Amino acid sequence: MTSDALRHFEEIVGSENVVRPDSERAQDYLKDMADFPSEPLVIVQPTSTEQVSKIVEYARNTKTPTVPRGAGTSLTGASSSHGGIVIDFSKKMNRVLKIDAVNWYVQCEAGITLDDLNEQLRKKGFFFPPDPSSSSWCTVGGAIAENSGGMKCFRYGTVKDWVLALKVVLSDGTIVKLGEPLPKNRVGYDLVHLICGSEGTLAIITEAWLKIIPLPEHNTERKRMLVFFDEWVHAGKSIQGIRINRIQPTLLEFIDRESMQSVNDGFDLKIPVHEATLFIETDSQIENILKICEENGSTGNYIAKDDADEERLYNARALVYLGVKALATGFHTEDVVVPLDRLTDYLEFVKSTSKKYGLRIPTGGHAGDGNVHPVILYEKSSKESEETAEKAFSDICNYAIQVGGSVSGEHGIGEQKISYAAKQIYQHNGKQALELMKQIKMQWDPDNILNPLKFLDITESY
Ligand SMILES: Cc1cc2nc3c(=O)[nH]c(=O)nc-3n(C[C@H](O)[C@H](O)[C@H](O)COP(=O)(O)OP(=O)(O)OC[C@H]3O[C@@H](n4cnc5c(N)ncnc54)[C@H](O)[C@@H]3O)c2cc1C
């Protein structure tokens, strides 16, 4: 980037808010949390929507690729830059602007973390339910752009279900407000939800109006527990049994032996380790749930003793990704979703893929949604090991597409899954659906400057 350009950014945001690529501070921007590399030409940390607008105007005039970035916890390379501007929202645009206790919404800037947001809401007796396990780092903007999920989404839905309105900067620098902070509004095309999950490829979110609800009352019926199994398929059948019996727990998560062991080793949580574990929270029907699990082969269970113990069990599941990541130098994180009636077959398929390729594939995730994440481990220094892991990754994505599932439930597409996403849409929705998406991208971002080379390959013809 020329020194004129850098000076221009310094004039817009102030010199302290421009990070040059050769500086120490730039180190934080060289990869995401799945180690996808990034080489930005400059990082800017704006303090207002107007500054974002000026940065994007420059990008549009000079056709410079521009990537909005939250905390970089993407697991797919979505926030990587390959030569261009990175707009970092996490440092200077992280304020709550309004908590409306009558209309039940919060207005905030894009860069606030979900945990900081919830801390401020808690003081007023409210909360924002979606809870990606990265909630202590990830930002509102990143979570909206990824339409993130989490454990509580089984009950409350994903981030998009909580977004009422957005302030965005378009690819020519125009500032627009989309949607209304109202409980109901059906006026116009739903552009708010077009932006949710668009991974920074259509517009840049600077502010959000999010639905909030009162913190739940303490419920003495509520229990958190672990149920243990000797076989993955027994856990899968138990989930199907719970559903067939029309029981709706509030959390329903799967954790395999290797994942649980990695969490114990990494975070000293002292959780019993079994071939498969279901982590369940329920407000009712605990006896029925345990009976269904027993009928499907459970070998035991553990019910949390108090609030701290409940927190320990929740953390055990939330820390799986970090525990497992420490097991190998290389990893591919899957995020496929399968229809619930295929969950048991899916778990068997992951097991057989691990055996077929001789790879370790610790597996854990949102079993109640059919969104269980295998993490394919490999040796980064070995080309052969990496290629074998890619084959396993491909097999699992193709399996999901074949059984009517999806290649991404919550982590998004990024650089990792463009071809699989296109294949899924092509096979499940048809060529026209892909063409429509391409036209939407070209309409919103005709010069392809917003997070190019991600999400949808608009140069490919279908
Ligand atoms: C340990 C760990 C656990 C995780 N657990 C979960 C989980 O349970 N559920 C889940 O869904 N995900 C999970 N993730 C993935 C990730 O944390 C989420 O996708 C998260 O919401 C990304 O937020 P971020 O602020 O880090 O975004 P980034 O990684 O910075 O960006 C992600 C995408 O959003 C875009 N973006 C960021 N900010 C904006 C903005 N202001 N406007 C427009 N686009 C923007 C970026 O360009 C990029 O495409 C996990 C990740 C880790 C490391």
Image (spheres, grey):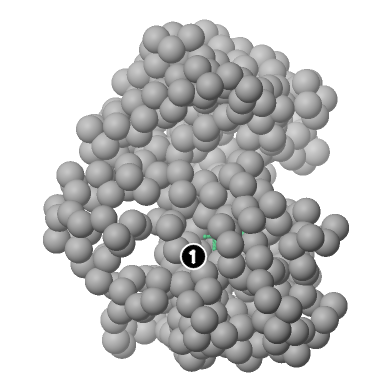
Is residue 246 visible to us here?
A: no
Q: Is mark 1 within 8 Å of ligand 1?
A: yes
Q: Nearer the viewer, residue 130 or 9?
A: 9
**Nearer to the camera, 97 or 296:** 97
Q: Which is more toward the observer, 356 or 30?
A: 30
Q: Residue at x 54, y 40 (%)?
A: 251
* Residue 35 sits in quarter: top right
Q: Quadrant of residue 13?
A: bottom right
In the image, residue 160 above or below residue 45: above
Residue at x 35% of width, y 57% of height: 456
Q: Which residue type carries mark 1?
A: Asn
Spot occupied by residue 96 in the image (x, y as percentages of width and height): 71, 78
Quadrant of image for the C terminus: bottom left
Quarter of the figure with the N terminus: bottom right
User: In the figure, is residue 128 to the left or right of 24?
Assistant: left
Give the camera-side residue of 151 and 383: 383
Q: Is residue 419 visible?
A: yes
The x, y position of residue 400, in whole percent, is: 31, 34
Q: Is residue 217 above or below residue 109?
A: above
Instruction: Tell me the residue that label 1 is attached to.
Output: 451
Residue 251 versus residue 378 in the image, above or below: below
Categorize mark 1 by other alpha carbons within 10 Å: few (<14), some (14-19), many (20+).
many
Q: Position of residue 66 (x, y in %)?
A: 55, 70
Name the spot of residue 152 as percent of width and height, x first: 55, 49
- The image quadrant where one finds ligand 1 is bottom right
